[in-house]
Image (spheres, rainbow, N blue to C red):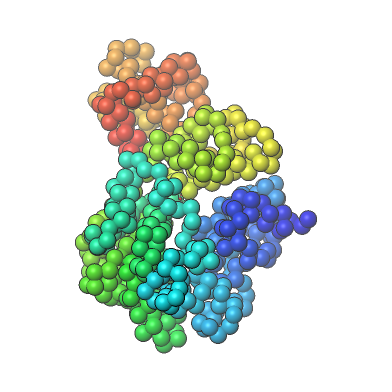
Amino acid sequence: MDQWARVQRRLRTRVGDMAYESWLSSLALVRIARDCVEISAPTRFMCHWVTNHYAQALEEVWHEELGSPRPIQVTVRAGDRAPSLPGSTPSVALEPPSLSPAAFAKSLSTGSKDPPNASPRAPPLETESPVLDRRCTFDTFVVGPPNELAHAAALRLAEADAVPFNPLFLYGGVGLGKTHLMHAIAWHIRSCSPQRRIIYLTAENFMYRFVRALRLRDTTTFKEQFRSVDVLMIDDLQFIGGREATQEEFFHTFNALVDNNRQVIASADKSPGDLEGVEERLRSRLGWGLVADLHPTTYELRLGILHSKCTQLGVQFSRSVLEFLAARITSSVRALEGALHRLIAEMTLRSGVVTVESVPDLLGDLLSANAPRVRVEDIQKVVAQHYNLHTFEMHSPRRARAVARPRQVAMYLAKQLTTLSLPEIGRKFGGRDHTTVMHAVRRVECLLKEDRLLAGDVDILLRSLRSG
Ligand code: ADP
Ligand code: MG
C-alpha cells in the first residue's frame, strides 16, 4: 500500500467515517518535500476548514508515516480556485458548504419553505448540513464553572420560544467550546422547532459568500437569504476585523434581523469591545444583548470532559492516565481531544494497554507544546508576594506554618505548572527531598477540597502565573 493510502486509512480511523467523508476524502497528496508535506483541497473553503480543524490530525498521521514531524501545507487545487457559478456545474457540490446558495439556505432551514407535502421533521442532517457537527450537542457538552454561564445562556436561548436576548455573544480562547455551543443550539432548535430557519456559518464564510455575491452582482439574493432566517449564527466573528465592506453588510443584516425580532448569535475570540478592526457602532451593538465568556478550563472540567469523551467513544483508560492528561494538557479542549485520540490510536495499533508511564513517550510533542512556560523562580516569587513573605523563605529550612504552608503551595504549583520531576522541584526549594515535595503536593490537594480560603488563593495564583 502506498504512503498516501496508508495515511488516508489512519486519518479515517482517527476522525471517524463521517468526518472523513465530509472533509478529508477529497484531499489529494501533492508532494512530500523535505520541509513539508503538501496536500490539496478542492476549494478554498475546504482548504481553510481542513487547516483549522484537521491540521493536527494530518500532522500526526504523517509524523507516524514518516517517522519524524513535518509541517503540513494545505493548498487549493489548481484549476479549482475560482468559485463556480451557482448551478453552473455539478462540481458546485464541492462549494461551501457543499451546496449552491439557494440550496444552502434551504438545507439549513426547514419547514416554512418546504413543499407542503414534505415531511414536517427535518430529514437526516448529515446529508443536509455538513457544517453542523453531529457530536456537538448539549448532551455531549460538559459543564463546569468556566463555561456554565455560556452554557446556561445557550440552553436558555435554544429552549426559548421568543427571543430572550439579542444578540447572544459568546467569546473565549480557541478550543474552549464556542462552536460546540452554537452547534448545540442549532441541533436543539432543529429538533424542537423544525419550522424555524437557521443559518450557521463562520464569519469567513459570510465574507466569502458576500464577496461572491458582489462579483456575481447578485447581492439581492444574498441579502434575502440572510435576512429571512429566524436564527443567524456567525462563528469566529473576529475574522471580519479590517474588512469594511463585509462589516457594513453584516451590520445591516444584523440590524434587520434584530429589528424583526429574529435571533442573532455570534462568537469571537474576544469580547465585543475588544474586537480589533471592527467599527465602533458594530462593537457596541454586539454588546447589547447577552455577552457570555468561556474561561480557560480547570483541571476538574478537563477530567470531566475526558471521562465523557471516553464514554462516548467506548474506550477505557485507567484513572491515572486521564488524570495525567487533565493535568498536563491545559491549553484547550481541542488539544485534550487530540491527545486522547492519539492514545486511542496507539491503543488500537498496538492492541495494548496504555499505562501512565508510557503516556509521556506517546504524547511527547503534544506535552511539550502544552508545557506552560512558567519557571519555578516565578512561582516562588508570586507565592511569596501573595503571602507577604520574602522569596528566600521558599528555600529556607524554617518550618513555622506561616512559611511552610505557602512553600507547600508553591511546590504544588510547581508540580502543576512545570514539567519538572519531584526531585528537581525539591532541589529548587532549598535542596529538599522528593518525598517532601510529594507530601506537599498531596497535602495541598487534600486541603483544596476542604479549605475554601486556600482554594481561592491557589486559584488566584494559578491564574496570575498562567497569564504570565
Ligand atoms: P472553539 O470554537 O471555542 O474554538 P470548539 O467548540 O471547536 O472550540 O471546541 C473544541 C473541541 O473541544 C470540540 O471538539 C468540542 O466538542 C470540544 N469541547 C469544548 N468544550 C467542551 C465541553 N465543555 N464539553 C465537551 N466537549 C467540549
Ligand atoms: Mg470555533
Q: Work out which quarter of the rendered image holds the C terminus and state it.
A: top left
> Does residue 241 appear in the picture of this structure?
no
**Residue 247 located left or right of residue 120:** left
Residue at (23, 60) in percent of width and height: 165
Q: Work out which quarter of the rendered image holds the N terminus and state it.
A: bottom right
Above-or-below relation of 69 to 212: above
Above-or-below relation of 27 to 347: below
Give residue 55's position: percent from left, percent from top.
56, 56
**Residue 131 located left or right of residue 20:** left
Residue at (32, 62) in percent of width and height: 265
Give residue 171's position: percent from left, percent from top.
33, 54
Dividing the picture into quarters, in which one does residue 414 lie? top left
**Residue 320 located left or right of residue 197:** right
Give residue 110's position: percent from left, percent from top.
41, 70
Furthest residue to the bottom?
Answer: 217
| Numbered-mark total | 0
Furthest residue to the front?
Answer: 117
Above-or-below relation of 358 to 32: above
> Does residue 400 appear in the picture of this structure?
yes
- In depth, the one of 332 and 114 nearer the eye is 114
**Residue 353 located left or right of residue 442:** right
Residue at (70, 46) in percent of width and height: 67
Give residue 92's position: percent from left, percent from top.
55, 77
Dividing the picture into quarters, in which one does residue 178 lie? bottom left
- In depth, the one of 72 and 96 nearer the eye is 96
Residue at (24, 62) in percent of width and height: 162
- In depth, the one of 157 and 1 nearer the eye is 157
